[in-house]
């Protein structure tokens, strides 16, 4: 029967193993003989027997190591070489994948930031047009009432009211809209900002101006009666102005909050690949580093003890203390003076 080189090798290895085990068994029996001759013998014989037994065991161990080393060189090492090469390739691929994931996450975060700013810009423009319209209407009513109050306070004659109304209309015709407050853009481009601005309906003050001008005649229509009760009329106007101011502030606050909620609900959510970041303590093989780790471990014991897993406290190492401190830093974000950290991604 013709055997392959591999089969021949296995048979040869089996023969070597059988011969070795026979030698090891003989060595064990020899040690037993030496140990059986311990009790009842003089000290020099006992010492000689122990020394001889140790030598037999050392020789046996050397032969066993020679055999296991041969197995390691001929079998285990070549076999594990396949795994090592595969692991290296996978590790290289994993590193590439991590970098791709980090880049994808960075791009997604940028897109999300742009989407958030875009939504905030839309909400800002809508809120500004609402504020401008509300402020414009409020201001025209306010200055009309203030003018009317001033006429009552100075007790202008009824005959002068037509001129007052005329002047008031002129003031309203020339009343400027409140300025549009600027939005501080960081990510939204000029082109996109203009596109957003143009897509939102602008406020047209013409109808509100016409209503305010008509309201002048309505307010002044009771002037002669109010002039006869100046204090009561002025107090009534003051209360109306206060109520109008409160209503203006409440409407503005409600509208702004509502638009913010709408903008948040409509904001595009960009799917971001997960990149787990972990803080590790940089190892410095120095006495000072070890002292720093131990002292901080003891100082922060109430917080770091939950991260310690040991079967025997006598075997707790400085490395395990450092790992516990690192987990504490990851959990809390705290900085520990004297301990340098590095960030890793997975």
Image (tube, rainbow, N blue to C red):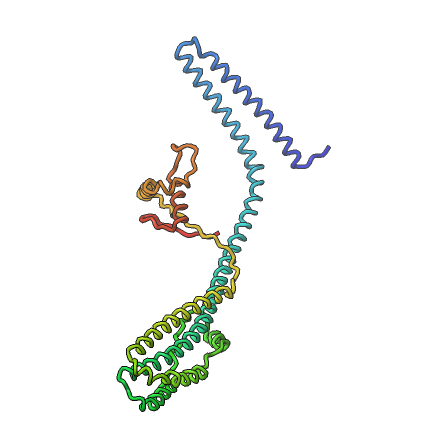
Q: Residue drawn at (51%, 24%), measured in percent from left and top?
A: 60
Image quadrant in which you'd find residue 147:
bottom left
Q: Residue drawn at (32%, 80%), measured in percent from left and top?
A: 146
Left or right: residue 108 compared with residue 171: right
Where 17 sits versus 253, above or below? above
Where 201 sits versus 81, above or below? below
Left or right: residue 275 compared with residue 9: left
Residue 278 place in picture, x, y as percent: 44, 50
Say which of 71 and 250 sits in front: 250
Say which of 293 and 197 sits in front: 197
Q: Work out whether residue 248 can be spotted.
A: yes
Image quadrant in which you'd find residue 241:
bottom left
Q: Residue drawn at (42%, 77%), measured in percent from left and top?
A: 133
Left or right: residue 2 compared with residue 243: right
Where 225 sits versus 116, above or below? below
Q: Quadrant of the N terminus?
A: top right
Where 92 sits versus 243, above or below? above
Residue 255 place in picture, x, y as percent: 44, 69
Say which of 201 and 74 sits in front: 201
Residue 86 place in picture, x, y as percent: 57, 47
Residue 281 place in picture, x, y as percent: 39, 47
Q: Work out whether residue 115 can be spotted.
A: no
């Amino acid at each position: 029967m013709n055997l392959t080189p591999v089969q021949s090798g296995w048979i040869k290895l089996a023969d070597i193993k059988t011969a070795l085990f026979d030698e090891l068994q003989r060595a064990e029996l020899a040690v037993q003989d030496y140990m059986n001759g311990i009790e009842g013998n003089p000290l020099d014989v006992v010492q000689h027997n122990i020394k001889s037994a140790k030598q037999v065991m050392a020789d046996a161990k050397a032969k066993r190591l020679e055999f296991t080393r041969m197995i390691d060189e001929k079998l285990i090492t070549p076999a594990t070489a396949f795994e090592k090469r595969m692991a290296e390739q996978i590790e290289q691929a994993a590193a590439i994948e991590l970098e791709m994931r980090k880049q994808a996450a960075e791009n997604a975060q940028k897109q999300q930031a742009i989407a958030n700013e875009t939504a905030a810009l839309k909400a800002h423009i809508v809120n500004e047009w609402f504020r401008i319209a509300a402020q414009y209407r409020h201001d025209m009513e306010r200055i009309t009432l203030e003018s009317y109050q001033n006429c009552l306070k100075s007790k202008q004659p009824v005959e002068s009211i037509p001129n007052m109304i005329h002047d008031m209309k002129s003031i309203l015709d020339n009343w400027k809209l409140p300025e549009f407050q600027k939005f501080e853009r960081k990510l939204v481009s000029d082109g996109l900002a203009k596109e957003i601005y143009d897509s939102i309906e602008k406020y047209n003050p013409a109808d509100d101006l016409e209503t305010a001008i008509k309201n002048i005649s309505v307010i002044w229509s009771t002037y002669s009666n109010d002039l006869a009760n100046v204090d009561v009329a002025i107090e009534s106007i003051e209360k109306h102005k206060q109520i109008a101011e409160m209503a203006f502030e409440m409407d503005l606050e409600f509208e702004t909050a509502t638009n913010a909620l709408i903008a948040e609900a409509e904001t595009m959510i960009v799917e971001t690949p997960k990149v787990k970041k972990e803080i590790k303590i940089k190892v410095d093989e120095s006495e000072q580093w070890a002292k720093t780790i131990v002292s901080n471990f003891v100082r922060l014991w109430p917080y770091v003890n939950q991260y310690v897993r040991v079967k025997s406290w006598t075997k707790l190492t400085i490395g395990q203390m450092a790992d516990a401190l690192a987990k504490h830093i990851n959990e809390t974000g705290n900085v520990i003076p004297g301990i340098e950290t590095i960030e890793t991604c997975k």
